[in-house]
Image (cartoon, rainbow, N blue to C red):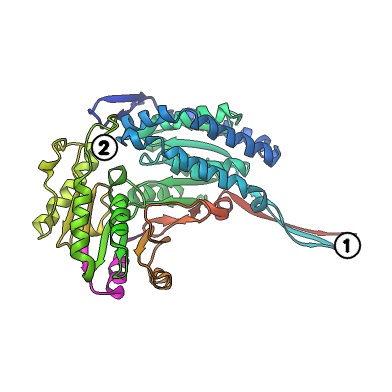
Amino acid sequence: MKDIELISPIDGSVLVRRTPLDPDGAQAAVARARGAQAAWAARPLEERVAMVKAGVAALTAIKDDIASELARQMGRPIRFGAGEMGGVNARTDYMASIAAETLAPRVIEDSASFGRRIAREPLGVVFVIAPWNYPYLTAINTIVPALIAGNAVVLKHASQTLLAGERLAQAFHAGGVPADVFQNVVLDHATTEGLIAARAFDFVNFTGSVAGGRAIERAAAGTFVPLGLELGGKDPGYVRADADLDAAVEGLMDGAMFNSGQCCCGIERIYVHDSLYDAFVEKAVTWAGALTLGDPLDPATTLGPMAHVRFARTVRDQIAEAVGQGARALIDPAAFPRDDGGAYLAPQVLVDVDHSMRVMVEESFGPVVGIMRVADDDQAIRLMNDSPYGLTASIWTRDDAAAAAIGSRIQTGTVFMNRADYLDPALCWTGCKDTGRGGSLSYLGYLAVTRPKSYHLKRA
């Protein structure tokens, strides 16, 4: 089979090369997972929790190595790389803390006549197809609750972050999770789709593109296997007239540019009330202009290359097309000498944009944001909803009641007030429309990887 190559965005060199499993090898791996799952589920819950937490501790112990590897694999500046482990620990700790309560049977009746209860049972073998942009955080969202609930997990990581899958497997095995219960596999698309179509798994979680999600759905058609799909976004920010202007600029621009804009819930379009618009744009341009585009291994770099040249090409095309339609680009790429026309891409702020432009309606997933002037809440809501996606929306205001009222009218999975690009493990991570289906984290994350089982016991 053809090897899978990881091309480093730093210099275009082949960083990692791995040979994917052939169909027989892939089926054998799943068979081992299925064979090991029952014994894993039979372990006391506290043992599973302890092993999962030990695995995450082993991962955290090598966070500096991980930061360097992430810079080489997908371009995140090394100064930010280890920060992903903070989120991994927070999500693991929270999901571990609610496991006993969430997974405990719900007793309906316990009398002399009847015992009635609803239990939660693991689904069996969970397949996680993880993305490259936050290769640990996104994978942990499903891996941790799946393992704690008693499932076996098979992980297929993105080709851009092959080393992340290997690190996760090493860490969980070091923590005591059996090798067959948690497996990292390298698969090509055809083998992946073949396994899904053959009903090899009991749950499939995929984070990636809409096209990728459609391919997963086609492969699963007729199998009745449940799917969890997070497929992208075009997340809006709205700055009301009563907003703290400086806080809004800092929060929204960081949400737009962090990780070179390669965030599932990154801010991709901003709507600003007329009274603050000019000041917001001026400050936003100053904020973006202060970024340092460069080698992600340099501690001074705040904006690294995009993960792949083809991703940067998509963003450049969107920007050029918008400018051709009348948009104004407020940042001169010449101010960022490291912009090489390849993976290294200067940040950009666009004005005079509208929703006839792809950059305002199609996912960019790069360091560009369009800013539009709005007259009131109604116009902002209409524009925020004018999107095929619905992951998060960020509202900047001093009025809680107004934020809640606006949020109730936005088609989105999460409503933020005065923050953006954040994930709270106690809240369900979910989306609507083309963003996907299902949800992870919170107590609902356990419901996704377990099934209800009812007991109706008539006592003599």
Which type of secondary structure does the marked residue at label 2 adopt?
A: loop
- Quarter of the figure that contains the C terminus: bottom right
Q: Position of residue 7 (x, y in %)?
A: 28, 29
Please state if 26 lies on the left or on the right of 71 as rendered: right
Question: Is residue 382 located in the magenta-colored stretch of the structure?
Answer: yes
Which type of secondary structure does the marked residue at label 1 adopt?
A: loop
Asked whether 230 or 429 is in front, the reply is 429
Asked whether 73 or 395 is in front, the reply is 395
Q: Work out whether mark 1 precedes mark 2 in sequence or the reverse, and give the earlier one.
A: 1
Q: Is residue 203 visible?
A: yes
* Residue where numbered disc 1 is placed: 112
Q: Position of residue 9 (x, y in %)?
A: 26, 32
Magenta span covers which residues? 372-391
Asked whether 194 or 156 is in front, the reply is 156
Above or below 387: residue 450: above
* Residue where numbered disc 2 is placed: 304
Q: Position of residue 442 (x, y in %)?
A: 54, 53
Q: Is residue 151 visible?
A: no
**Kind of residue at badge 1:** Ala
Instruction: Determine the image quadrant of residue 312.
Output: top left
Instruction: Determine the image quadrant of residue 346.
Output: top left
Q: Position of residue 81 (x, y in %)?
A: 37, 35
Give the class, few, some or many, for how many residues have Cα within 10 Å of label 1's Cα (few <14, many ≥20). Answer: few
- At a point 56% along the width and 32% down the height, the residue shown is 55
Please state if 364 lies on the left or on the right of 200 as rendered: left
- Quarter of the figure that contains the N terminus: top left
Above or below 349: residue 26: above
